Amino acid sequence: MKLAPTIIILGSLLTAGSLQAKWSRIPIIKEKPVNTITGPASNASLDSSSGFGHVDSILSSDITASSTVSAGKSFVLVNLGKPVLISSSSFVNDGIEGRATLSASADKNGWAVLEEKVFSAADRTVEFKFAGIQAKFVKLELALSKGGIIRYLQFFGAASDKGYAVKQSADGKGGKPTDLINGLGGARVIYAAPKPANGLDTAVTYNKFAFPESDEKYRTIIYDFGQLRILNEFASVHSPRPVRFEVFAFDNLPEKEDWRGRMAFDPNDFGNKAPVAVAEDTRGTGSLKAKPAKAVKTRYLALRWEPEFNPPDFQCTGAAEGNVINIVTTNTVTITNSDGTKTVVTVTVGDAHGAGAATSDVTPENAGQMIAQGTATSSDTTVVTTATFAAGVDPSAPGAQPISSVTTTGTSTVTVTTQSDGTVVTTSQSKTVDTTTGTTVTTSITETKAPDGTTTTSTSQTTTDAGGNSTTQQGTNVNVSQTSSTSSSSNGNLAGGSSPSPSGNGSTSANVTNTISTAATSP
């Protein structure tokens, strides 16, 4: 029996099967480093330079923006605005060759050399890694035998996207253009194929992928923004060789559990989608931009590169631009109203990617987007509290109590109001979204505490389907007449997502004797 042909056939089938295997989802990182010189809290500015053309591009958040640099000696000096911690740096090299020296200083008088690099024109990325240092000024000096272009200068250290959230208008037209992948857009890599050669952790954290030589036709990255985003333009900086660049948007990513119980994506699903934007780098310049026919509204975005031939390696970084009207950070603002009352707004941005989904103005256009936005809002841990204090009351004084407050956490909202007669009304509202049908269930619980100790609790539940049709079911009122002295176990705020028991026992001490009467609530 001739076994060789059989073995060859089986080997070919196994190879073909492996190429079409489903991809395993990458765990989402909660906190992502951001470029110190273009990040949210950056005060960086150009101090001086020599030998650079279009030097302002050094501080641009546009990954394709380029600065020319001549052969010989040149430098660029960046003022970070304040002392910040930095521990690594890099830039994209388009054809320059020589030596690069990176230095740091606190006052421009004494300089500490962080690292020197000798590189050739073939080195696409020049990276510096060094022990963390506090610096206010950083200087990049080049001694080149061959001039060319540099792009995308970055410094990483302590700055991250934690504690920030960006807001877009409903139509995405307000505000200014911002890179929502490499900045504060909340984008997280959830799939990358083939597996990056520079290590999955490094590639995902810094959005810089060095794909190895592979029989696969495409190099693919899929992002989850954490909520709906409106995107107007896409960009790529990649290895300088001809490439076709495609962008795909998924209203609801078609994932399924694999045999290990992990979420997986089948690359064959791309065959069921048309790209929303396409561009080609026919000359192999190493950068391009793709403009969609209309603005793209999506939570899940896939970028796909198709090199003209199978390269030994392929490096790439992708970007997606959308207009941003506001950047929100953890903060407290006090407003004095015309009637003398004071309103205190406290925002604590959560640590979930895409934080701020609960107050996003971007509205879904279909059921899939409703599901994506609903699940995003449910996972948002941002807390927004608006408290109003009576005239003459100092909100910062110990023990100061507001006359009303509204606390929102994700899909839960708690409103507490104290009436003139001392009655306290607390309403807790929460939403849940069925990810398979798009149905939203809103549950409201209102607790009214009278000065005489009587507590009344009412409930209602509204179900809204994907088409916007609603039905409401009312619960029952429970009247609790307290016959002995009570001691409250809370300040009346039920906190995000919590709800009292129908009997009211969750808000009174255990030694209270209650008389309970129940009556149906009329619809």
Image (spheres, rainbow, N blue to C red):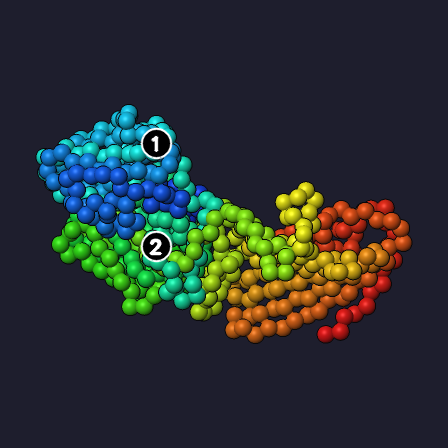
What element does badge 2 sit on? Answer: strand
Nearer the observer, 182 or 14: 182
Q: Position of residue 223 (x, y in %)?
A: 38, 53
What element does badge 1 sit on? Answer: strand
What residue occupies the far right of the structure in this picture? 483
Q: Residues within 10 Å of mark 1 (few under 14, many from 20)?
A: many
Q: Which residue is mark 2?
A: 178
Residue drawn at x 48%, y 65% is: 370
Q: Which residue is mark 1?
A: 135
Quadrant of the image containing the C terminus? bottom right
Nearer the observer, 326 or 157: 326
Is 358 on the left or on the right of 287, as rendered?
A: right
Closer to the chain start, of discs 2 and 1, is 1
Tell us which disc is closer to us: 2 or 1.
1
Q: Residues within 10 Å of mark 2 (few under 14, many from 20)?
A: many
Nearer the observer, 498 or 131: 131
